[in-house]
Amino acid sequence: VCLVALGLIGVIVGVIAMRRGSPWWHGAVLVAVLLFAGPVHHGLLGGHPEDELVTALVLGATLAAAFDRNLLAIVLLGLAIGSKPWAVIAIGPVAIASSDWLRVAVLGVLLAILIVLPMPLANTSAFRAAATGANKIDEHHLYSVWWPIARTETTGPSGRTIVVRRLPHWIDHGMRPL
């Protein structure tokens, strides 16, 4: 489902480009890049396909705002931020693309708050534990800026060997995700 949304947004952008005179294959290349690019592959392997869905929501919100579909832009932006907090970086581009930038930005953020707020209210300790776990950075992959200085460890449950790279504790302790 997450990849379907990303492919669909690529098709929509391709159709818009074709209507403006671009050849059909530009859209096909865009869909291929969106679906097969390294970060998409890494996100899927890392068990986070929802990042692709949020990317599609952000792209859809920006397109909706650019075509003066402000209500759709608000809903898509709110869903994106409510799904993954990193989507707040889309507030600026979506607002700039909109003719009613302040309304789109404020209502998109308010919708995201309404989506997320019931979780900590329903079970504060579980929400805090999940947020703490999500913010822990202890394994580093090839795309990480910390990769060159991270040490290699071999671990594994039940006799299986898994090689991970971890930062020294004195560095890792002070790091926070963006």
Image (cartoon, grey):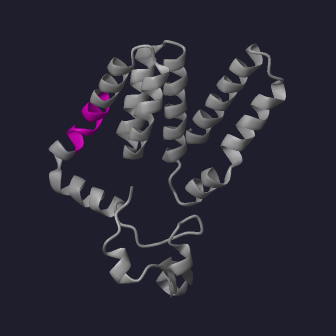
Q: Is residue 130 above or below residue 163?
A: above
Report which quarter residue 31 is drawn in.
top right
Q: Is residue 63 above or below residue 173?
A: above
Q: Is 115 a magenta residue?
A: yes
The x and y percentages for residue 148 are: 56, 77
The x and y percentages for residue 137 are: 39, 68
- Frontmost residue, 119 versus 61: 61
Q: Residue farthest to the front?
A: 96
Q: Is 159 a magenta residue?
A: no
Which residue is depicted at the point 52% across and 57% down? 47
- Frontmost residue, 134 versus 23: 23
Report which quarter residue 41 is drawn in.
bottom right
Which residue is depicted at the point 45% across and 35% down? 90
Q: Main secondary structure of the magenta part?
A: helix
Q: Which residues are magenta?
A: 111-119
Report which quarter residue 35 is drawn in.
top right
Counting the numbered discs, the total is: 0
The x and y percentages for residue 82 are: 35, 38
Left or right, residue 47 beside residue 116: right
Which residue is depicted at the point 49% across and 12% down? 68
